[in-house]
Amino acid sequence: MDSAVRALIEALPFRPLVRPQTLLPPIILRVWRWRPLKPYNGFSHAERVLNWQVSDWLRCAGALLAPDVCDLCRASAPLGLHAEDYTDPERAMFLCQDCHFAVHRRFSVPAALAERARAPDAAPPWIAALPSSPTDVATQLRRAGYPELLDRLPPWCEPLVTHFRSDHRGKGDGGSNLVEQ
Ligand SMILES: [Zn+2]
C-alpha cells in the first residue's frame, strides 16, 4: 500500500459503532434515486450506495453517532456522511453540504477546500492526508487484505448482512422491501 494511502486511512476520524440497547430498526433501506455516482477513490457507484445504505441504517439504529458540528468547518448545520474508505463506516466523516462539495471538488478547485477549515491551525488531520489527485484507494485496500464493508460489521448487524447477502436488493435497485425517501 502506498504510504500516502496508509496515511489517509490512519488520519480518518474513528467513531466506533455503538451496539444498540434497544430493538434494531427494520431492514428498510433508502433507495438511491439520483444520477449514478461517479467512481471515487476507486469505489464504484454500487459500493458507494451500499455504504450509504448501511451507514444510514446504522445511524437509525443509534449505532453510528454523529457529532454536533461539521468535522471540517465546525459549523452547526445539517450533516451528511462522507467516506474516503467506503468499506469502513467507523471512518466516515460528518460534513455540512458546503464542506462535502469542497472535498469532492478539490481536484479541480483545491483552494475551496482549504478555505472551509475555519481555523486552519485546527484543521483535522485528514485534510492534509486527502489525495490531491484521483487515487484508487479501493484497490490498494483490497490488495492489502482489508475486509469488505459487510465483512467488517459486528455480529449484531447480522440481519442487515443477511439481507444484502440473501438477495440483490442492496444495490438500491428498487427491490420490493425498499422504501424511497
Ligand atoms: Zn462544514
Image: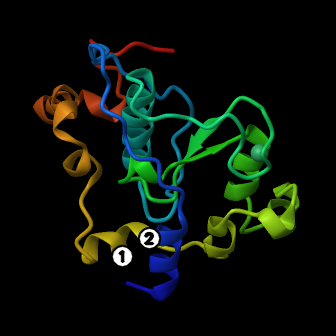
Q: Position of residue 25 (x, y in %)?
A: 32, 15
Mark 2 crowdedness (10 Å alpha carbons): few <14, some 14-19, many ≥20 = many
Marks 1 and 2 sit apart, C-alpha to C-alpha, by 5 Å
Residue visible at 72% across and 38% down in the picture: 69
Split into quadrants, the picture shows ligand 1 in the one at: top right
Q: Residues within 10 Å of mark 1 (few under 14, many from 20)?
A: some
Q: Nearer the viewer, residue 52 or 19?
A: 19
Q: Tag 2, which secondary structure?
A: helix
Give residue 66's quadrant in the image.
top right
Q: Position of residue 159 (x, y in %)?
A: 17, 25
Q: Is 66 left, or right, of 78 in this rendering? A: left
Residue found 23% across the figure and 29% down from its top: 160
Q: Would you say the beta carbon of the disc 1 residue lies within 8 angstroms of ligand 1?
A: no
Which residue is outermost to the bottom?
A: 3
Q: Is residue 75 above or below residue 62?
A: below
Number of numbered discs overlaid on the protein picture: 2
Residue sitting at x 76%, y 64%: 123
Query: Where is residue 76 drawn, in percent x and y?
Result: 78, 33
Kindly identify which numbered label has been placed on residue 173: none
Say which mark, if any, is on residue 137: 2
Residue 120 x %, y %: 85, 66
Check disc 2 and give the amino acid type.
Answer: Val
- Name the foreground residue: 131 vs 153: 153
* Residue 8 visible in image: yes
Frontmost residue, 164 versus 122: 122
Residue to which mark 1 is pinned: 140
Assign a secondary structure to mark 1.
Answer: helix
User: Dots 1 and 2: beta carbons under 8 Å?
Assistant: yes
Horizontal placement of 103 versus 177: left or right?
Answer: right
What amino acid does circle 1 point to?
Gln
Relative side of 97 to 3, left or right: right
Give the quadrant of residue 139: bottom left
